[in-house]
Every structure is written in C-alpha cells, then in structure tokens.
Image (cartoon, rainbow, N blue to C red):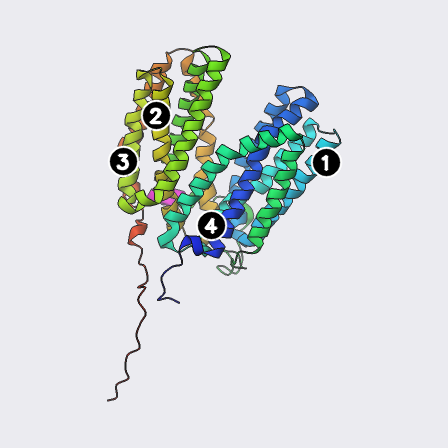
Amino acid sequence: MNGSPPVPLHRNRDYRRLWAAHALSAFGSQATYIALPLVLLTATHSVTDFGIVIFVEIGSSVFLGLPAGVLVDRIPHKRLLLCCDLGRACAFGLFALAVVSHRVSLPLAVLLAVVNSVLGAPFGPAASAALRDVVPPSQLTSALSFSQARAATVTLAGPLVGAALYAVTPVLPFIVDALSYLASAACVASVRLPTRAPEAGRTAAAPRFLRDLTTGVHEVRRSPFLRYTLVNAAVVNFAFHGIVLVLIAQGAGGGDDGSAGFHNGAIIAVSGVGNLVGSLCATWAGRVFSPRALVLVIGWTTAVLVPLLPLSGNIAFTGLIIGLCGLTAPAANVVISAARLHSVPKHLQGRVQTACDLIPALIVPFGPLTAGALLDRLPASTVLLLYGAVLAVLAVFSTASSGLRRIPDLRETPVPDPRPVRAQPETHA
C-alpha cells in the first residue's frame, strides 16, 4: 500500500536473503584466498605460477567489467545471480576433485581464475542493482552501510577460516567454497525480483552489444556527479594502496622478521576493524550530515591525518591513524553509492556501475608501483607526505566540485505518512 511506511530492513525478507546471498558468495571467495596459493605451490613448487594466476584473475576482472555491466542490464537480475552462483559452485567443486586426486596444475588454476572472473564480474553489480527492487530509496543508505559492514567482516574472517580449514585438509576450503555458492543460490532463488530485464521493453530493437559497451561510459561523461565519483574513487584508491605499501616497507625494515610480521599484521587488522566500525556508523552519519558535507568532512579529515603518519614510528600511533582513516572511509562510500544507485536510471545500473569501477580498478596497481619507485629515491616519511598532499588536493577539488554539489540527498526522499487514512463521509449536493 502506498500509504504504509516502509518495512524495516531487519524485517524485509527479500533484502535479508539478498544480503545473505552476497555475504555467502563473498565468504566463499575469501575462504579459498589463502588455500589456493598453498595448493598451487605444493603442486608446482613455483611462486611465479601463483603470480600468473593472480595476474590472470585481476586482468580478466578488469577486462570483463564493461561486458558484465551490459549483461546486468540485459538479463533479469535473479537469473544472472543464479547462473553466477551455480557456475562457480561447479567450478570450485571440480577443482576440489583435482585437489583430492593430486591433479592440480598451472593450466587448471588459470582456468579456475578465468571462470571465477567471468562469473564473478556481473555478480556484484547485479546484486547491487537488485537492491532498488527490494529496498525503498529512503533506506538505501542503511542497506549499503550494512553491505560495507558485510564486506569488512568477510575480509577479516574469510582468510582466517580458510586457513583453519586448510589446516584440517587442503581440499576442505574448496568444498566449503562450492557449498557457499550453492547456499547463495538458494537464497537468491527465494528472493522476489522482477522477471524482466531492466532494459526489456524500452526499445523494440536492443542496441548492438559492442555499441552498448560504451553506454555506461557516456552516461558517466555527461553527468558531473558521476564524473566526480570516478575521480574520488581513483585518487583514494591510488593514494591508500601506495600508503599501505610504504607502511609495510617500513615494518619490513624496522626489525627482525617476527616484529615485521607483527607490525604489518597489526596495521591490516586495525584497518579492517576501522572499516567494520565505520560501516556500522555510516547510517547514523548519513542521517546527521548532508551527503556533500559528509564527503567533505571525511576528505579533509583524511588529508589531515595522513601527514601525521611520519611523525612517529610507534606502531600504536600508526595503527590509530590508519584505524581512523578506515573508520571514516565507509561513510563516504555509502552516501556516494546510495546517491548513484538512486540517481542512475534502472536500465543503466549495471553499465554505469561497471564504468565507474573500471578506471579506479585500473589505477590501483599504480599506487604501490609509484610508492615503490619513490621509496628507492626518498625517505618513507617524505613519500607519506607526498601521498598526504595528493589527498589534500582531492579535498580541495571536492570542495570546489560542481559535481559533488549535485549529489542527491536521500534524507529528503519523501516517506509515506504512517498514519492510516480515514474515510471521509460522503456529501451530496
């Protein structure tokens, strides 16, 4: 009924099952994150082979980004999600058989990486686009904050669980991975989603597939807000991947192997905890601040915090700064993602999302690459200050950006009056 208030997320059956499906799918991927290199190293005794597998998987994901967006807009989300889950369940189930029979090889691992990329590329955009079918606009910020919390939790727990399963028997992480995709498929099967693709019915003849690949890019180019989100994500990814490498290099050069491992592990763990707590607080922050104000506060806070990193070699101080940066980042991600999800036409969700993700993904490797080149020539403290300067430039750009001024404020989305409408007595002339 139009006059009834929206159902709370914790009582929204379709949202809960879609959230669980995405969590199970992500958990399966993280569970084998530790196991795959160990199995491959045991079989081939070559670190280079694992590097090849990682390169193929990342390269395939980037290359398949735009085609995946077209599929998300052309195929009903439920059908696409089910195909991705069932296909990956079969792939990891077959790989588990190879592990049991001691037939793991580099070509087989590369094939698994390609299949995982082909089926994983459309899953995330399809699951995000499906949120609009199960969650009203007024609840998008809350829904996405829970998605950020899910990602942080899975990133923390998944590799630990995978390592524990591998310690029992090497094949167990892959069996659990396959089962997690089957469980995800079961959740998706029970979600009520439209049976028609978002693009269906818009035009009598669908555009050619190759021409359709650039539709999302054109939409980003013509929208100042979408262009801003792309620049923001690219710069933040570049800076923080470089900062992490600098901190890891500092830890490796600051003591014996044991202390270096503790230093680097503590930084990664604190960053993950900060992300988790920040994700849980993102809904509150989105209610208190306007989206533009929140993005600016977070941008300037980060630009001020990062230059403090060179002031002390104390691991507790470093962890505090990294934790605070991790704490603030999810709120900006949530409000930007919610605004983009709300403002982009439904039939363009997949293509726009993959177009916005493409350039930041391409930028990621250059952060560590630049950091490594700078560390060969400059002290670590100077490199950290340079990355802080990059974030300060982004904060200035954000303050002046007309694109950020156009970010939709979902707090202003009309909410139906929860009071029942009373019938008016009939009057006769």
Q: 77 or 327, which lies in front?
A: 327
Residue 90 image point, x, y percent: 67, 43
- Residue 247 appears in which quarter of the rendering? top left
Q: Amino acid at mark 2?
A: Leu
Q: Is residue 221 part of the magenta span, yes or no?
A: yes
Mark closest to the chain's N terminus, 2 or 3: 3
On the image, numbered disc 3 is attached to which residue?
A: 297
Q: Which residues are magenta?
A: 220-225
Which residue bears the numbered disc 2? 320
| Residue 327 rendering spot, x and y as whole percentages | 36, 33
- Tell which tag, 2 or 4, sits nearer the viewer: 2
Image coords of residue 386 (percent x, y): 33, 20
Considering only vertical position in the picture, is 399 above or below 3?
above
Q: Amino acid at mark 3?
A: Val
Estimate the x, y position of residue 280 in percent, counting from the top left: 38, 41
According to the picture, the residue beneath numbered tag 1 turns out to be 97
- Rendered image: mark on residue 129: 4
* Residue at 36% across, 65% down: 4
Residues under labels 1 and 2: Cα distance?
45 Å
Q: Nearer the viewer, mark 3 or mark 4?
A: 3
